[in-house]
Image (cartoon, grey):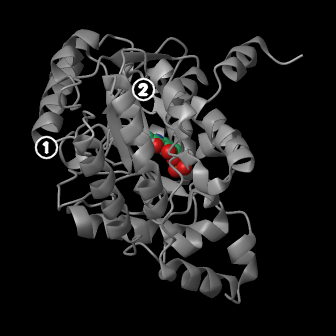
Amino acid sequence: MISEKMVGLVKNSSVIRAMFEEGKKMAAEFGRENVYDFSLGNPSVEPPEAVKKAIIEVAQDPDQNHIHGYMSNAGHDEVRSAIADNINRRFGTGFDASNIVMTVGAAGGMNVIFKTLLDPGDEVITFCPYFGEYKNYVSNYDAKLVEIEADTGSFQPKVEKLAGALTKRTKVVIINSPNNPTGVVYSRATLERIAAILEEKQKELGTSIYIVSDEPYRELAYDGVEVPYIPTIYRNTIVGYSFSKSLSLPGDRIGYLVIPSEIDDYKDIFAAAGVATRILGFVNAPSLAQLFVSKCLDASVDLEIYNRNRELLYNSLKSYGYECIKPEGAFYLFVKALEPDDKAFAARAKEKHLLLVPGSTFGCAGFVRIAYCVDYDMIRRALPAFEALAKEYKGE
Ligand code: PLP
């Protein structure tokens, strides 16, 4: 008999994953070229060549016990130093290895930091729409996810609702920019307003409120848009980074946390994050992946491929009458459903073999998410289906 808590979790298990599985079934039935699966954020661009070279280099290292052995729970020292140096060069910070904990992707990092910070009943704030897995990560530690409603005009966070949502139990505010599911990049002005509210509230309540900046899409930003580095804006910031999307390595499960020395209770938090890494069963992030990504810190996937997809899909959908914000980052479009019920709309889209994820999965009903980290040709083939769907709703 599985646990009661798991019964609920299994029942509400990821809609996105379910659609991904459904897509595979439909491909078998109708032929792969006739199914347009926009459900999963699985990178379609190949990892850069530097990754392959680095893997070979690491595999051939004469010190095989170092490559494959246990290490500090926080990860290899030289990897953490290389990452700290890279961040310092890019953002003018002053980190060293003692500020970096290697993690099993962003998901592993979020779980490590939540295990470190959260007591049962603590509150974690998230701005809608948000990555639905946050609900599960927070519930792993019996804390409560508090949603702040979406600004469906700009999809910037509704900052004016933040102060009212902060309580003595608020431990964390999650920021995810570039955002999944909207592709919106939070502006510096918005982040500065959030920082000012949190500073004031910390003083008023006498508590520490940490921003956890979930950054798997940091490197996926278009047209030179600035993605501000939040530790330089708000002192109590912990960053969760991942190489899943920046280097197209989601299966290798590698990322890191940045825990700045300036945050409240730094020493305890850094030490506890190492223990959390161990007792959650990760023990340490995968050694080989740590070592090869540390040689690819300046590499990146070819962003122009995603950009081409973004332009084609955005411009085409607009021309068919769909409403949507042009995303500045990540590889998602968040499109207004053509009827109020986003699930019903996604079901109608599925009849045309378009697999889209309902916005309610992200705490924002009335929209659907389209992941455009797919083949350009699949988008081209899917366009008539999008157009036919719009026409159907218009009664044409
Ligand atoms: N956070 C967000 C916003 C995501 O979109 C994802 C994955 O899609 C993750 C975290 C998890 O990423 P990772 O594969 O690095 O664990």
Which residue has dot 2 on it?
Answer: 359
- Residue 6 picture location, percent across and down: 73, 19
Which residue has dot 1 on it?
Answer: 188
Q: Which residue lies furthest to the front in this view?
A: 396
* Residue 128 appears in the rendering: no
Q: How crowded is mark 2: few (under 14 residues within 10 Å), some or many (20 or more)?
A: many
**Quadrant, the N terminus:** top right
**Quadrant, the C terminus:** top left
Task: State whether residue 140 is above or below residue 111.
Answer: above
Query: Are discs 2 and 1 less than 8 Å apart at CB?
Result: no
Based on the displayed image, in which of its 4 quarters is residue 22 positioned?
Answer: top right
Q: Which labelled disc corresponds to residue 313?
A: none
Q: In this view, does 196 lie to the left or right of 61?
A: left
Which of the two residues, 385 or 270, is positioned nearer the viewer here? Answer: 385
Rendered residue at 26%/16% (across/down): 206
Tell me the element at label 1: helix
- Residue 11 picture location, percent across and down: 69, 18
> Which amino acid, by three-letter code, is at mark 2?
Gly
Task: State whether residue 392 is above or below residue 66.
Answer: above
